[in-house]
Amino acid sequence: RKEVEQDPGPFNVPEGATVAFNCTYSNSASQSFFWYRQDCRKEPKLLMSVYSSGNEDGRFTAQLNRASQYISLLIRDSKLSDSATYLCVVNRGTASKLTFGTGTRLQVTL
Amino acid sequence: GAGVSQSPSNKVTEKGKDVELRCDPISGHTALYWYRQSLGQGLEFLIYFQGNSAPDKSGLPSDRFSAERTGGSVSTLTIQRTQQEDSAVYLCASSLHLGGNSNQPQHFGDGTRLSIL
């Protein structure tokens, strides 16, 4: 089983839709979780950290489910500019290297 | 403040040549990562440096690849006897390790686009 798994998509949604991605991780001791966004031919950029209690930043909500070992990202009122690949990042639980998922591609259309 | 800086931004070289890629992490960041990404693919982990600990080299694809981090700051990734399949974007990231069991997020450089002819 991969350390971090994501559905590669693509998720094709109309503008204004709500879309959610999940990311599962294999190490139950993992402590740090992040969502990154990567635009085509650009470097990944931090979108948000994921906290145990869940957190929200504008249209974006991130949640952590430790029992089922997954994190989620919810995007409300999708914009064309949200089109990108969303990468899930998890540490191994020993403060060692952060591991990236392969990403979920989102395409928002008119 | 200054972010992660990588050089060169683009490198074109002939098959069989050696190349050296450089990464200047954010000042004070103790963790440094190298990844590579082929067009349309995900990030492939190569190597990880954390402070004075032995680097995690588990992602290096072959013994033609090596990396150093001098003085806990600048890092160089060296690819010897380059092959066409080495063509990719090589990304460097750094982060601050606060101790304990948690990580701070990584900050990426713009990458070096390597093309092997």
Image (cartoon, coloured by chain):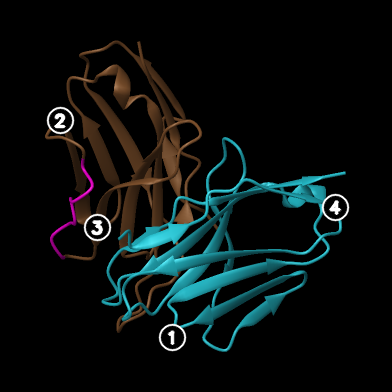
Chain colours: A cyan, B brown
Real-space Cα separation, disc 2 to disc 3, in angstroms: 18 Å
Q: CA distance from mark 4 to mark 1?
A: 33 Å
Q: Amino acid at mark 2?
A: Arg
Instruction: Label 2: state its secondary structure.
Output: loop
- Earlier in the chain: of badge 4 and badge 1, it is 4
The residue under label 3 is B49
* The N terminus of chain A lies in quadrant: bottom left
| Position above or below: B17 against A73 | above
Where's residue B93, x and y in %? 41, 53
Q: Are marks 2 and 3 in contact (CB under 8 Å)?
A: no
Residue under mark 4: which chain is it in? A
Sort mark 3 into few (<14), some (14-19) or many (20+) by Cα contacts within 10 Å: many
Q: Amino acid at mark 1?
A: Ala
Q: Nearer the viewer, mark 1 or mark 3?
A: 1
Task: Give the left or right position of residue B63, taking residue B73 as reference.
Answer: left
Which residue is disc 4 drawn over? Answer: A15
- The residue under label 2 is B64
Do callouts 4 and 1 point to residues on the same chain? yes
- Mark 2 vs mark 3: give the one in front: 2
State the residue in front, B40 or A7: A7
Residue, disc 1? A67
The disc, 2 or 3, on the residue closer to the chain's N-terminal end is 3
Q: Classify B47 as above or below B81.
A: below
Q: CA distance from mark 1 to mark 3?
A: 31 Å
SS label for mark 3: strand
Q: Residues within 10 Å of mark 1 (few under 14, many from 20)?
A: few
Residue at left 32%, top 34%?
Answer: B21
Asked where in the image residue A60 lies, by quadrant, the reply is: bottom right
Quick check: do tags 2 and 3 share a chain? yes
Labels 3 and 4 in the same subunit: no
